[in-house]
Image (cartoon, helix red, strand yellow):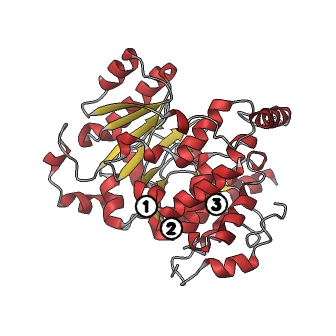
Amino acid sequence: MARVFVIINLVVGLLLALYLRHETAPQAEPDQLLASVDTNAYAPGVAKPVRAAFVVLVRNSELAGMKRAMRQIEDRFNQKFNYPYVFLNDVDFTPEFMTETAAMTHANVSFGKIPHAHWSYPEWINQTYAHECRQRMHKQGVFYALSESYRHMCRFNSGFFFRHELLQDLDYYWRIEPDVEYSCDIDYDPFLFMQRQGIKYGYTIALHEYPETVPTLWSTVKAHIAAAPEFVRHAAGMRWLSADGGATYNGCHFWSNFEIGALSFFRSPEYLAYFDALDRAGGFFYERWGDAPVHAIAAALMLQKHEVHWFEDIGYYHNPWLNCPQGAAARLRCHCDPAKSAVLHYWASCTREWVELPDANATAPNPASTLISLLPSASASQ
């Protein structure tokens, strides 16, 4: 019986891999995108075809891990394309950090300090109650339950990173974190690919969130939809976020430690109003709302399916999850093990569930109107 079960698992995995190879081909071949681009435009110190940069939120103490990540992205991609880096920190960077990271690349590097207002408690937060909430979550065994800095980080990445002065001249960003690994050569420009294909958000792994970290996030989102129905432009996105017609949140989110995005999406009035509603609700501090579900809910409901792209071809690892291309051709440019890719695991089933959404996503004049009629009241329990 055990042998039969193993065989069934192998067959299912093979069929899934074949399906993914068929369904996730890019809208255009990268070589075609680069054919009309002057490769001299990627020389160090010159303006790139796309106004874009790597954006890195990092502490001085993470210097070694940051250098490891830079070595990975430089070897696999940026030694050919020379996109700049923007490093951000809530304190001043040390001379050691700035000198050693700059030495890892020929590209331009910038170092910025986060404004205090973007990394502190807003005036409407009851800090005594927030402390009590952290203690209660700690007793429940929630990851990062006691960490205040983790909550400031999630709030910053949810609503403020794109407002930093060093990003004001950028149109796209690529988020990088210390100690991540890139296991495949990237021989095309993902920024240019996104720009030419009209893609607003790119990811490699999509997971289910820990429900104990976001107990009231969904009810807060539903209240915002009721107050601002124009927020929902992609009705099919609700199917990705909820398995019961919107009554509850299934936890699906794009794992945001890797994301490539259009900053215009976050700077839009609709996203800013959405973030403001979440921020006022206090869940970043009274619970442990992460920037990943905050970004993902907005992307799923504001963007059409074709505006969100799975970079299946980018080999990426952030402990403990791996994205590894499934195609045989990828093995010629990758060193990861496709059998260990997160997409084959239930906890990352959201990755393929986004791909499986219907392509026909015509936007109705007011697509949220039908959703609101189906949703329980905003005050209802999740």
Residue 135 in the figure: left or right of residue 57: right
- The mark found on residue 11 in the picture is 3
Q: Nearer the viewer, residue 326 or 11?
A: 326
Q: What distance separates the C-alpha of mark 1 from that of mark 2?
A: 8 Å
Question: Disc 2 designates what residue?
Answer: 303
Question: Disc 1 designates what residue?
Answer: 200
Residue 71 seen anywhere in this rendered image of the structure = yes
Label 1 neighbour load within 10 Å: few <14, some 14-19, many 20+: many
Q: Residue at x 69, y 44 (%)?
A: 124
Q: Nearer the viewer, residue 221 or 310?
A: 221
Q: Nearer the viewer, residue 30 or 258?
A: 258
State the SS at label 1.
loop
Q: What distance separates the C-alpha of mark 2 from that of mark 3?
A: 34 Å
Label 3 neighbour load within 10 Å: few <14, some 14-19, many 20+: few
Q: What distance separates the C-alpha of mark 1 from that of mark 3?
A: 35 Å
Disc 3 residue type (three-letter): Val
Disc 2 residue type (three-letter): Leu
Q: Residue at x 33, y 19 (%)?
A: 99
- The mark found on residue 86 in the picture is none
N-term mark: 1 or 3: 3
Residue 104 in the figure: left or right of residue 65: left
Would you identify the image quadrant in which residue 218 lies? bottom right
| Residue situated furthest top in the rendering | 96
Give the image location of residue 96, x and y in percent.
38, 15
State the SS at label 2.
loop
Q: Can you say whether 320 is above or below 341 in the image?
A: above
Q: Residue at x 43, y 40 (%)?
A: 183
Give the image location of residue 318, x and y in percent.
55, 38
Give the image location of residue 147, x and y in percent.
69, 30
Q: Nearer the viewer, residue 62 or 334?
A: 62
Residue 90 in the figure: left or right of residue 99: right
